[in-house]
Image (spheres, rainbow, N blue to C red):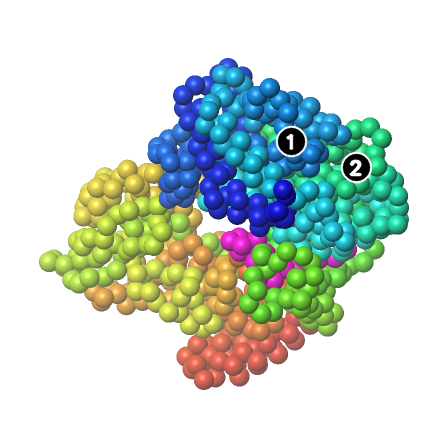
Amino acid sequence: MATTAFSAHNLVRDFCTGGLLHRLARALHQSLAAHVAAPTQTRWADWETLFRLSHEDLSQQRRIDERRRVLGALLATDLKDPKAEYAALFALHTAYAILVKLIAWRVTTDGKAQHASLRDFCATLEDGSGFRGVTKLCEGDFFAWYADPAQWTDAIAASVQEMLAVLARYDDPRTIFVDTHAVDLFRPLYEATVPQVVRVSFGEFYTPLWLAQHVVRATPRAAGWTALDPCCGSGTFVIAAIGELRRELAAQPLRDAAREILRRVHGLDLNPLAVLTARVHYLIHIADLLDAQDGDVTIPVFLGDASSFTTDIGTFTTIVGNPPWVDWKSLPAGYREKIKTLCIDRGLFSGAGRTGGINLNICALITHVAASNWLAPGGSLAFLMPKELANQASYEGWRRTVGGADVALVALHDWSRAGHPFDPVKEDFLTFLFEARKADRDTVAVRSFAKTGKARSHAWTTLEDAETNLTWRDHVAGQLIEGSTAYTIADDQRELDRFRKIAGHCAYKGREGVEFYPQELMLFTYDGPGPTTGTVWVKNVQVARSKYRIPQQRVLLETTYLFPLAKGPGIGAFDYDDPEMLVAFPYDASNPHAPLSQATLEQTSPLLLAFYRRFKTQLENQTAYSDSIRGDGEFYGVARTGPYSFMSCYVAYRDNSKWCATVLTTKTMPWGEEKRFLFQNHAVSICERSKTQAIDLDEAYFIAGIFNTGVVRDFIYATSDNRSFKIRPPVHVPLFDKKNATHAKIAALAQEAHRKRKLRAVNLAKIETAYLKLCDGRVKQPTLL
């Protein structure tokens, strides 16, 4: 007798919390450990090609170790290498797939298995014949291997039998769709099946149903609209679209309503496990309509690559979804190379250079493909994507292509303050709404949402839940920066016009800080004078959550190549909170891009050289990215050095989190010597007027004064995602002219603000007034760097 409601909560309780699904995974894993038949090996190899994990990146070693520990504990085994880890994950995915298929079987039948054996029953699930009234629900996917007689075991049979017994107690799942409200069954179930640390490795962060419902409802839809989610995952946007359509078709006969839904709502995904889940999700949400159908139906969720122009599924008036947020450099090498030529040919990459140009997020490519391939003329596309796509330089080409003549960006919804709906992911993101037409406005409407109260936004189940816990404000965005497609988000048109006044070119080039890694071997704190003149005792720093485990030790070093370190977090407006750290920097201005040779250090700093040699393996064990930008030279070389590493007067500012600037000159070291600062990454500096001329102190205060004004600070925040600011800020900063009275006034006010904290607010207001007048009368400056 059915007594259990068909709900996500109950599925998680009965199959995950009680351990039933994971017992099946252990039985499957034991079968793989005992024997792998040839057909199983083929399916496993194909699955592994798709589900590649990171094993080689040592910067992720702690996460890899944790992933193996958690997955091993779940399956009661020890995972010591990639092969063992893949076997465990293949078994876990198979167990989840079996449960999804059993739920589908429960939806399409009376729940009574009538076969000669349990294995025969499972075989009918895998060939698709076990689902009444539905064709092609399963198509011999990766996860059919367990039903092979060579893999079937008593332990597998016992777990499947127990699952069937539990499902038999559930209500008829065809009654789940009540009052046309969609219900997300599988996101909570999958998250309870696969540990978070494993999902993070795949970039799997499924969209809460309420957020998908908001995107669907916010997307303009004409009469007779059709919908596609090209990265449908478990089908959250698909069922949200079904819910909207069912409301529209509520008065239609059941047969007509089912026919319309199957014709008009489609899904696509590259992941066979996701396709299976989305098909069953879709099936559940139309199950009550199927009794009125003549003949079998096919669920329109297809296996295909949303980043490929060769996938032909027709055109749609509405495209919605949450494409994967994966940086280009993080993609598997083979897949990355496969689509590289496509991206370059279509102008999607921007800013190519030694350290970063080809760094597009895969969701940008998918947006381009979706708009080009599947969006009908006049149709709408709405994707959830990182906020950085709206303003970062890496996406200049993409914004020109997707926001250009044929596809117009018409609105942005900002979820940065909505309480992290994708928790534990904290990245700011937007809904980008496009229309397939030529852009006819130079501004874009922006609506920002903010969470109220303590309710967790990732746990809300319906849009109605969300609407009672969110407030919203309207803003406006515009493309203000000359030669750039980046968007600046302002409170209103008046603020946008104010930002437009200062947007422009900075005549000074910012320099990124040096890559001093590993920090435990590069950075030190002073621990007293040494036994001889020119030597000091130091201790190497310790960094929490570092990939290196180098214990702290007291080391004797020469002072010759020890310098004070400037770190980003210490930089304030006309302030610097010095962490009192030292850094070894064995370089010379005559060859600023390469470290001094070991032969030279033997003569000038043998203690430092001996320290480096003790840890040669760790110093050489850098990531491929660091190797590519630090260039040739000795094993203790570091990245991002140049003539600018040998100046004595700097404007220092941060490249993330908090916009502010200060002036740094030299520092008196504990042993009495005056030394220049060196800057670690995330601490940016300006020290050059041109390639051959350094800035002086007045010039430094002129630049810092402008950077610290409220209007510049607000503009930087409005045109950035706060995770990264542009190294060369896109604001009008002319070359300093000592003869210009306004320039001199700004420099003097800034220098006074630096010396006298109590005058900072007053002086900054005066600097801002002077700066805005300077912008009013600006003349385009030459680019000298």
As measured in the structure, the alpha-carbon distance from the residue carrying label 1 to the one carrying label 2 is 19 Å
As drawn, 649 above or below 352: below
> Of 738 and 365, which appears nearest the observer?
365
User: Alpha-carbon neighbours of circle 1 within 10 Å: few (<14), some, or many (≥20)?
Assistant: few
Residue at the spot 42% in from the left edge and 63% down from the top edge: 569
Label count reads: 2
- Residues drawn in magenta: 410-427
- In this view, 73 is above or below 688: above
Decide whether residue 317 is among the magenta residues.
no
Q: Is residue 674 above or below residue 261?
A: below
Q: Which residue is mark 2?
A: 290
Q: Position of residue 748 (x, y in %)?
A: 49, 78
Residue displayed at 30% across by 61% down: 581
Q: Is residue 65 above or below residue 717?
A: above
Question: Which quadrant of the figure has residue 740?
Answer: bottom right
Q: Which mark is residue 112?
A: 1
